[in-house]
Amino acid sequence: MEPLHIVIVNYRTAHLVIECLRSLESEVKNHGKTTVTVVENASGDDSAQKIAEAIAANSGWSSWANLSISPVNGGFSSGNNFAARPALGASNPPAYVWLLNPDTVVHPGTLKALVDFMEANPKVGICGGALDDEDRLPWPYAFKFPSLLSEVERAFQFGVVTSLLSRWVVSRRMGEQPERIDWICGANMMVRRAVFDAVGLMDESYFLYFEETDYCLQAQRAGLQCWYVPQARIIHISGQSTGLTGKSAGVKRVPGYWFDSRRRYFIKNHGLTYARLTDAAWLVAFILGRARLWLQRKPANDPPHYLADFIAHSSLRTTAIDGGRSAPK
């Protein structure tokens, strides 16, 4: 049985982290060489105290779970790297690192399903499972890599365009059998140690969003596959740290770091010229799409200041490959 390390990055969601740990208790017992690190990502509240008390109070948790305090909130990649770096540098490093969101509850048998799939498929570097929402309704999606044409489809928001560009739509509805994909949601993502050996840790220039997309792309370029494993299920109460997603999120202004991450993804992986062409195509599609809605007297339901924020963070305003990002205030 190969050692495995689970990383949970907390930002002001201590109560959810504790429930996630509770759901992991039986998983850890069934896979004896499993350890869990909860990274307290500079929440600025009493998260560290609550999580530490829960680990101490629940019988046996302290034998497999520990709390690690990050001095700064460097984002999702930084938080995961904060725990993965020492684990991978240990004398007996884990064969797999499983990234879990704090707002997840693990179905029984999920860890085994992912490990068994990895053991049976040595060319797979990253895999992840199916998500259920907070009402336990399935959300069976994985993803294709973003491209110029996928951005046109996303901006235009029109059924005919979506049908014409269906090959490039990012979200893929998945079936009930394992299937190779481009990238998987970072809320439930198991990474083989060979990926870290080949491409290093996750890119910390992303604060939040697009980091798992980028990481799966780097793994693929290194010859390691990404797969969707529907037998590995978690409940994902999305948007608990950011408030941007989930049923209670509403239509909110998209933060600058989302646009910065998007810009970095395209420039880093496709070059500045391609990124600019993509942004120009998005702008044209967006304007045409909103003109259509205006003529049909239909609401657009865009986030506040969406077009202005897109332009402000666009690669069209960038003169070089940049790694900058805007952290939340």
Image (cartoon, rainbow, N blue to C red):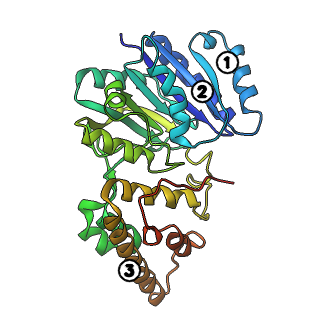
Nearer the observer: mark 1 or 3; the answer is 3
Q: Residues within 10 Å of mark 2 (few under 14, many from 20)?
A: many
Kindly give the residue lying farthest to the bottom in the view shown.
295
Q: Is residue 153 left or right of residue 99?
A: left
Disc 1 or 3, which lies upstream in sequence?
1
- Residue under label 3, please give it: 284
Q: Residue at x 41, y 85 (%)?
A: 292
Kindly identify which numbered label has been placed on residue 55. 1
Mark whose residue sits in front, 1 or 2: 2
On the image, the x and y values in percent for residue 227 come to: 29, 37
Give the amino acid type for the residue marked by disc 1 in the picture: Ile
The reply to whether the C-beta atoms of the residues labelled 1 and 2 are less than 8 Å apart is yes
Q: Amino acid at mark 3?
A: Val
Q: Position of residue 98 (x, y in %)?
A: 44, 28
Q: Earlier in the sequence, mark 3 or mark 2?
A: 2
Quarter placement of the C terminus: bottom right
